[in-house]
Amino acid sequence: MHRAKKIIMDFKAQNIADFLQGTVEGDANVSVNNVSKIEDGKPGTLSFLANPKYEKFIYETKSSVVLVNKDFHPEKELNVTLIRVDDAYQAFASLLDLVDQFQKQKSGVEQPSFIDESASTGKDLYLGAFAYIGMSSKVGDNVKIYPQAFVGSNVIIGDNTIIFAGAKIYDNSIIGSNCIIHAGAVIGSDGFGFAPKEDGSYRKIPQLGNVVIEDDVEIGANTTIDCATMGSTIIKKGVKLDNLIQIAHNCEVGENTVMAALVGIAGSTKVGKNNMYGGQVGISGHITIGDNVKIGPMTGVSNSIKSDKTVLGTPAMDIDQALKTYVVFRRLPQMREQLNELKKELKELKSKQEG
């Protein structure tokens, strides 16, 4: 056991240029240890200029280094070191990846923390203070488990996976490699299973299954994935879930599906691959959603959907029909006034006829 080590990023302009295959104009030895927006630049940080609308800021920015396109020609004198690259935006994205990697380069076991003697852990483990690894669990190489995270018994965690602070991984869960579980997420909690009794109360149905999360999955903060009643709730490879999502027991989410915040999926629903869901989508239980389906925000889905469909509205309907319905819906107040006017005219005609 040893104390965790903090890694601090500190790069010279020339190091960055070499990494990006760019060229330096200015002080090649100036160092940066963070990034910032060009309009909010601070000494010791790196910014980028890709959109011409922001060019005015490069003449006054306090950033130490700015990435620019090779064809950038300043109109005024500059007081900042430039790194010229083919595509400043893409180069900056690459640097953000690098910064992210450095920020997550932690190792060692902080105290107090707990690893059961029957558990096994791989090399380069980071275990934060007050974290817990239960009986017979197996943790792969280069795994990072942040403070106050809980890993139950018989859990398997693959290589290079990150469990952020306060996440809870219940017993028997299986998590693949290169996954990210954000703070407060709960994996493997009991499914919502209750049987009504004659006296009007409910009997809890034991949830004996588990959750299986395949490789390259990202689970957002405070998202919950319930274990199966029997068998497994399965999140397939490459799935990306936003914050505050609920996946119920015995669901299956297909490869490379993405869901925005506040999506809720009821039990035993099967979701295909390459789906895209907007925020606040609600999906009923025991239905099937095909592949390549897009569901607009705040849509309520109560029936199965075939592959390659785009739906919107409550109840969910084909996007073209939904947009036509919305046009009518917006005109309802005007149509109501017209209807009342017609009723008034009809009443007057009827009165004249009777007279």
Image (cartoon, rainbow, N blue to C red):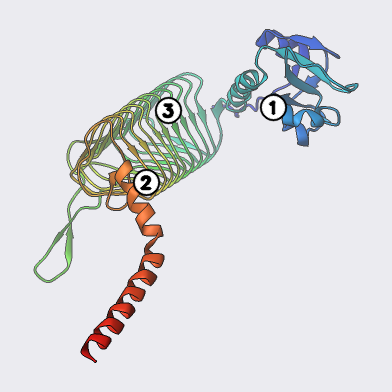
Q: Amino acid at mark 1?
A: Asn
- The N terminus lies in which quarter of the figure? top right
Residue at screen point 71% across, 9% down:
22
**Tag 2 secondary structure:** loop
Image: 182 above or below 199? above
Q: Nearer the viewer, mark 2 or mark 3?
A: 2
Q: Nearer the viewer, mark 3 or mark 1?
A: 1
Q: Amino acid at mark 2?
A: Val
Asked if labels 3 and 2 touch by Cβ distance under 8 angstroms, the answer is no
Q: How many other residues sit within 10 Å of disc 3, few (<14), some (14-19) or many (≥20)?
A: many
Write down the residue under mark 2.
263
Residue at screen point 82% across, 31% down:
61
Distance between the Cα atoms at labels 2 and 3? 20 Å
Residue 235 position within the rendered picture, expressed as x and y whole percent measured from the top left = 31, 32
Residue 124 position within the rendered picture, expressed as x and y whole percent measured from the top left = 51, 20
Write down the residue under mark 1.
51
Q: How many other residues sit within 10 Å of disc 1, few (<14), some (14-19) or many (≥20)?
A: few
The image quarter containing residue 154 is top left
Residue 190 seen in render: no
The image quarter containing residue 69 is top right
Residue farthest along the bottom direction in this orientation: 355
Residue 117 position within the rendered picture, expressed as x and y whole percent measured from the top left = 38, 30
**Tag 1 secondary structure:** loop
- The C terminus lies in which quarter of the figure? bottom left
Write down the residue under mark 3.
179
Asked if labels 1 and 2 touch by Cβ distance under 8 angstroms, the answer is no
Q: Amino acid at mark 3?
A: Cys
Q: Earlier in the sequence, mark 3 or mark 1?
A: 1
